[in-house]
Amino acid sequence: MSLRFLAEYAENALLALDLARKEVSHLRYSHSTLFVHSIDSAWVLQLASREDLAEKVEAFVSRFGRLQDHIGEKLLPRFAALLDESPKSLLDVLAYAEKMEWVECAEEFVGARKLRNLLVHEYRSDAEQFLQALMAAREASEMLFGIVRSVEAQALVFGLADQSNNSRDAQA
């Protein structure tokens, strides 16, 4: 299937992709520095008294949520607009992205969004539930990285990667 894109939406899509790449880089860093620790229930219980560990968790959770938000609210809708699609809700965006194979499973993305809410609140009240959510978020991060890679591949198919590099060079 040959896809044609609407050039007038290319700049916004490329800006969203560039920001997604930066968000991925930040989340990868937090992911790699947090998960070098052996995280178990005892480790989670230390968060109340270990500001250094709590700060690592906060950075990971914040970056995890920020990348999710950016993917769902900016990146996927802007790439859909390139193809003259204008999904109205997040579920519509995800259904379209799944159809385009940018997202493997829309339900997994929605599940990862629910994890964020658990991560924000639960370590203060339920260490075991927080531990489970944190480990699930570790895996869900890989899904988010994969979505950005899929959208990057779509940009290459459209020949937009060259434009993206040129616009970054011009901004430097």
Image: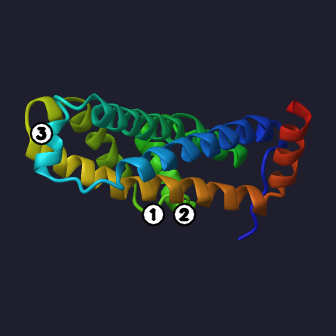
Q: Quadrant of the N terminus?
A: bottom right
Amino acid under disc 1: Glu
- Camera-nearest residue between 92 and 148: 148
Asked if marks 3 and 2 touch (Cβ < 8 Å), the reply is: no
Residue 144 against residue 1 in the figure, above or below: above
Q: Nearer the viewer, mark 3 or mark 2?
A: 3
Residue at point 82% right, 37% down? 8
Residue bearing the label numbered 2: 101
Could you give the CA–CA distance between mark 3 and mark 2, rounded to whole angstroms? 40 Å
Identify the residue shown where x is 81% and y is 52%.
160
- Closer to us: mark 1 or mark 3? 3
Q: Earlier in the sequence, mark 3 or mark 2?
A: 3
In what element is the residue under mark 2?
Answer: loop
* Left or right: residue 159 compared with residue 150: right
Number of the label disc, if any, that sits on residue 45: 3
Q: Which residue is mark 1?
A: 104
Q: Is residue 58 left or right of residue 101?
A: left
Depth check, front residue: 20 or 50:
50
**CB under 8 Å between callouts 2 and 1?**
yes
Q: Is residue 156 left or right of residue 34?
A: right
| Label 1: element kind | loop
